[in-house]
Image (cartoon, rainbow, N blue to C red):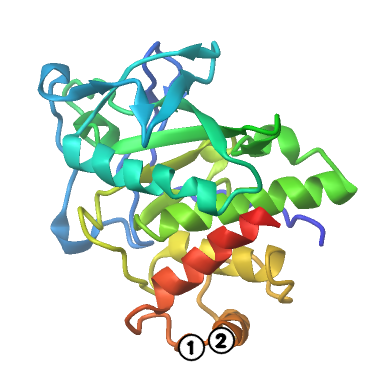
Amino acid sequence: MPDPLTRRRVLGLGAGLAVTGLAGCGAVPDLGGGVAERGESATCVPRSALGSHRTVGGLPLVYEPDGRRSAFRFDAAFHARLGTWAEGLAAVLPSPPEQLSTYGSWTDGGTACDSWHHAGRAFDLARVRLADGTEVSCRHDRWRSLDGARLDEARQRYWALAAGLHARFSYVLTYLYDAQHANHVHVDNGRSGDGDPTFSPRSGVQVDVVQAVCRYLWGQPVELTGSWDAATRRAAGTVLDGLGLDDDLQAPGSWTGLMSAAAARGRD
C-alpha cells in the first residue's frame, strides 16, 4: 500500500537537545487535548542524580550522529523497564539484536522542565542493528524514499518495533506525530509510569499505531487519520477477533495482546 502523506500535528512540541547538542524531543506529549493525563508533568532531574549506562537490556548503545558507543543517563525505573523491552527483542525480530542507535535519553532542561528527557525518563531510538547485518530502522526520513518490497519490509519492521514499545509504554511517538520524529521513535513513561499501558481512544499516538499495524501488518483497509472512527474500530475488531482477543481495546489484555502480536510480526 502506498504510504499516505504524513500529517503534522502542532501540539506544542519544543526542541530538546541530545547529548552533544543535536535536536531531540521536546515538550511533554499529550492525549490530544494538550494536558497530560492525571495532571502529570515532567520535572528536571540533575545529571548527577541519574545512573550512567552504556547498555539497555544488554545491548550496547551507540550515539546515532557519530556511530560511537556512548554512555547515557537514565532514571533507574525507566532504564529497567526499557531493558525488559530490549531483552524481549530477540523473540520478535528476524535475527538477534546486537546494538541500539539512539539520539539520547537525559538532557539538561535548564528552567524549562517540559520534557521527560529532562528527568531521564525518555529515550529516542534511531535503529536496531541485527546479527545478520540488517537493521530495524526508525529513520523514516531515509527509508520513506524506498519503493516496492524494500519499502514494505522497512515499514513493516518499523511498525512492529513501535508496537513492541507500545506494549510497555503509553507514549511512543512516531513519524505520524510530527516532522520532528521522522528520524527516531521517542518513548517515555510519563503517563504509564512503571505499569503496563492501557488504551484510550482519546490518545492520538495510540490510535496512530492501531491504524498503522492494522494497515501495514494485517492488510486492513484503514486510513491513517489519527481518529478513533468507525472504520478504525472495524479494522481493529477484525484483527482482534482473529487473535482471539476481546474486540474492545479497553478490555483487560486486549491492548497489550494486540501490540505484542504486532511486535511478533517483525519476524516475518
Q: Residue furthest right?
A: 148
**CB contact under 8 Å: marks 1 and 2:** yes
In the rendered view, would you say 215 is above or below 116?
below
- Depth check: 228 or 52 in front? 52
Element class at badge 2: helix
Work out whether mark 1 precedes mark 2 in sequence or the reverse, and give the earlier one. 2
Q: Position of residue 104 (x, y in %)?
A: 39, 25
Q: Residue at x 74, y 72 (%)?
A: 219
Q: Residue at x 32, y 39 (%)?
A: 27
Q: Residue at x 23, y 24 (%)?
A: 109
Report the label total: 2
Answer left or right for 194 relative to 153: left
Give me the disc on residue 247.
1
How far is disc 1 from disc 2 in space, using C-alphas? 5 Å
Q: Position of residue 43 (x, y in %)?
A: 14, 36
In the rendered view, would you say 196 is above or below 115?
below
Q: Position of residue 18 (x, y in %)?
A: 39, 20
The answer to whether any part of residue 115 appears in the image is: no
- Depth check: 20 or 149 in front? 149
Give me the disc on residue 237.
2
| Crowd around label 1: few <14 · some 14–19 · many ≥20 (10 Å) | many
Q: Amino acid at mark 1?
A: Asp
In the rendered view, would you say 100 is above or below 32?
above
Element class at badge 1: loop
Answer left or right for 135 relative to 186: right
Residue 82: quadrant of the picture: top left
Q: Residue at x 28, y 46 (%)?
A: 81
In the rendered view, would you say 86 is above or below 207?
above
